Amino acid sequence: MGKKKKHDKKSVKARQKKIESDVAIAKAEQEAVTEIAEFGSALRAAKGFVLSDVDTRSTPGFSGDKLEGKAALAASEAELSDLLERLFAESTAGSKRALLLVVQGMDTSGKGGIMRHVISVNPQGVKATAFKAPTKEELAHDFLWRIEKALPEPGELGVFDRSHYEDVLIVRVHDLVPEPVWSKRYAQINDFEHRVTDAETTVIKVMTHISKNEQKDRLAERLDRPDKYYKYNPGDVDERLHWDAYQVAYQAVLDETSPVGAPWYVVPADRKWYARLAVQQLLLEALRAMDLQWPAADFDVEAEKARLAES
């Protein structure tokens, strides 16, 4: 009996500590949310935006530190999940609205982490596409053909890991097609995105922007850790040799393809925790603006309650 009482006391203390810990975490998360400002206005690439002026370790729209940033990310997960479910639910009642997140950035700029830590909170209705080098079939069509096929359906959040912008980035840097061809694509992309937004799909375009030194450190970590070997691609070092050309190409993208309705947001990404928080908050701002509503029942609720009670 004595051992049992001691065991019970330990169990009570453990439960109390767990409750106290949960309360402390909840309080920290709530306090961290107060550090959040409006990310959209802080990160939008407006007219005259200069990419080289961005401090890649800065945290626009957030005044907290790493711990507070992680707490703020956790504190907003429930709302993001709820809004994504509302978006999906609306489609069952005939809504055509959808959301498209386009994520571009240099290698190791954190695109995979955004998928794991931000998008995974509610996988229902999420359509993720990682665009690789085009296949023979894709090359036989216009460069936007494969992109249009991957657009989200009503109620879905579509996520593009790389996208149609490869056709004015890598294509330009490596001179894969003549300049008269790729230079026309900016206008074609703008027209395409106007059609997408006209079809009630909200478009959020994010460039995860890291420094060359940060990329080097991240690649070195992959070579130092066996559990990271699978992420390493020798071609990433080859691409680093074209760093300056890519910066010029990205600046052109920001200058030429940030129209009303589908603007670019440049997210400083040397701090992984901040990049994840920024993308989460951009999604939340877009979803809140939709004023999503749960669809009304298309049946007699009280009658169904009565039928269920009698079954």
Image (tube, rainbow, N blue to C red):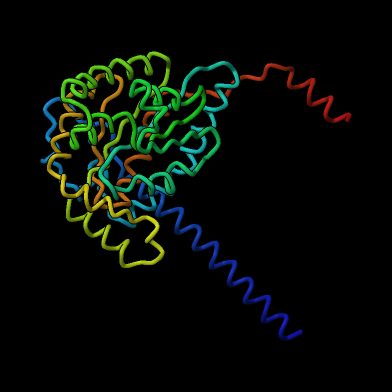
Residue 102 coordinates in the image, percent (x, y): 35, 33
Between 26 and 229, which is closer to the camera in this rendering? 229
Q: Is residue 189 above or below residue 129?
A: above
Residue at the extreme bottom:
2
Residue 60 coordinates in the image, percent (x, y): 22, 42
Is residue 288 in view? no
Residue 262 coordinates in the image, percent (x, y): 30, 23
Quadrant occupied by the N terminus: bottom right
Is residue 10 in view? yes
- Describe residue 155's horizontal placement relative to residue 115 as left or right: right
- Describe residue 128's horizontal placement relative to residue 85 as left or right: left
Q: Residue at x 16, y 49 (%)?
A: 241
Q: Residue at x 53, y 17 (%)?
A: 95
- Describe residue 20's horizontal placement relative to residue 236 as left or right: right
Q: Quadrant of residue 294?
A: top right
Q: Residue at x 23, y 24 (%)?
A: 258
Q: Is residue 119 above or below residue 167?
A: below
Q: Quadrant of residue 44?
A: top left
Quadrant occupied by the C terminus: top right
Between 201 and 66, which is closer to the camera in this rendering? 201
Residue 156 coordinates in the image, percent (x, y): 50, 28
Q: Residue at x 83, y 29 (%)?
A: 308
Between 166 and 121, which is closer to the camera in this rendering? 166
